[in-house]
Image: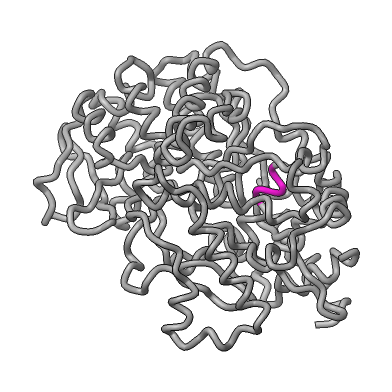
Amino acid sequence: MDEQRVRAALDAVVGQLRRYVPDMAPYFEDDRPLGEYAKALSPTSAVAPGHAARQELIARSVRKVLGRAFGPGGPADTVTAQDIRAVNIVDHHQLLNHPLLLGTNIIANAGRLLSGRPAAPIVTLSCSNVNPSNHYMRNGFRFRGTDIPYFSAKEHRDVMYYLPPRPFDFVERLRSLKRWSAFAPDDQDFLEEYQQLLNGLDHSGCTVHRDQLATVVHGTWPRLFSEELRPHIPDLLYAGAEDVARESLIELLAEESWLSTALLDPAQRQRVLDTFRGVVVAWDEAAGKGTHFFWLRHPRRPGLLRLYVQGNALVPADERFADLRIPLEREALREALHREDLVPSVALYMTLLLFAGIRPLVGPGSLVYTTQLRDGWRTLLDRHGPAEEARLLDEVDVTGMIAGTPVFFERTGPTLTTCYAADVMSAGGADAAYVDSVLRTPLNDLLSVGSGGVYDLFANSYIPKEKRLTERTGFDEAATLVHDWV
């Protein structure tokens, strides 16, 4: 596709997104440099008194979850409530890998990357209720256009949350699959060094794979940047969102609040079920989607069971496991959370962040569902109380867009290629000139590179069938046009 057609295709896609998905329109009209936009993502106003103690609780839970992976004296010990007032909720709990997820950590923290000053750690609440074969991971990571597995195909239904610790053995797997010789000698050297790095990190406190991943993300994040930048890059800490919510709920369920009432009071609980039915991350019983508040540990494999409220209990939708019901009672829920038998759903942990007044930094899809969750809770609490909590929810900003576009590219002749994390690391990381150019790129130009993917996300639900575009550009074509400085 020539430059004129690429420009026309981008303009058409962005034009329809602005028209048919009005929540996205402001971002495609925002021409502030990324660095300036990113600085505005962090709240500057005082914390509402009703939110202060709750944010301290979330920060305490983050420290507890990460402390299990890093041990006492680790990087998580310094996390404060201020560090989680605005937090990336887009990423998955896995190796740094996919360009779209890498971009979230850069965009959310762009204003801090070249500050030259000591910076507090970056906390990302990553989703661990995904399987190893998910689209962003594909059983491992991607390098030089090839999927590199360290999970087996038979684990495709398992979830990251419950997987036991394991060695990173992708070199051995590539050899056994007869795929090792396809890599050039320099790439083989990188893969061997990368595997040695991952296995050589301190995993001594890691009793589950999700803890190993926290140490791996922390240990590999600096390598996305050139060696001279690494001492100045803030730590990146991946705390599993489900774990943080689980630890927080153990404490919250011992107290009275509108959140505990929503789970424990039958009348209010039914209102909640009716209010959020059909929201993407909540539940839709007729369609067999989602779960009521929590997922349940599968008794036979590292997996999850859907739960539905029946009377005063959470009961597995799969009748074969009906005997594993959990009473919807304060202590029964707290004990099941403590045993890690219950895993909070996305709808529940996002509600917890709203309850604490934390600004979720979102992607195009999560922009929609976090807005639906906040507005639904606000209406429900305004009608059924406590009304002051509805007013507190008015103060929670859910419009912090940080996703939907890659930021790492390499040039091959006249064109650009979108890079995965291992590609960036193998090249020595992005230098100061590259990072500075990204920071100076206008937000709307940056987002236009990923606009085709955003369009695919929303097309079926928002754009009339007869108006849908058939020609869209890929990341590489769009980036070649937009990022001509690379």
- Image quadrant where residue 267 sits: top left
Residue 30, given in percent of the width and then of the height, sits at 81, 46
Q: Does residue 313 appear left or right of residue 437 in this picture?
A: left
From where the camera sits, is residue 8 visible? no
Q: Which residue: 60% across, 32% down?
A: 359
Q: Does residue 47 appear left or right of residue 131 in this picture?
A: right
Q: Which residue: 73% across, 65% down?
A: 13
Give whichever of 390, 320 is nearer the camera: 320
From where the camera sits, is residue 314 visible? yes
Quick check: is 413 in the magenta stretch?
no
Residue 3, given in percent of the width and then of the height, sits at 87, 77
Q: Which residue: 38% across, 24% down?
A: 259
Residue 215, given in percent of the width and then of the height, sits at 51, 47
What range of the chain is rendered magenta? 104-108
Q: Does residue 46 appear left or right of residue 256 in this picture?
A: right
Residue 320, given in percent of the width and then of the height, sits at 11, 56
Magenta highlight: main SS: helix
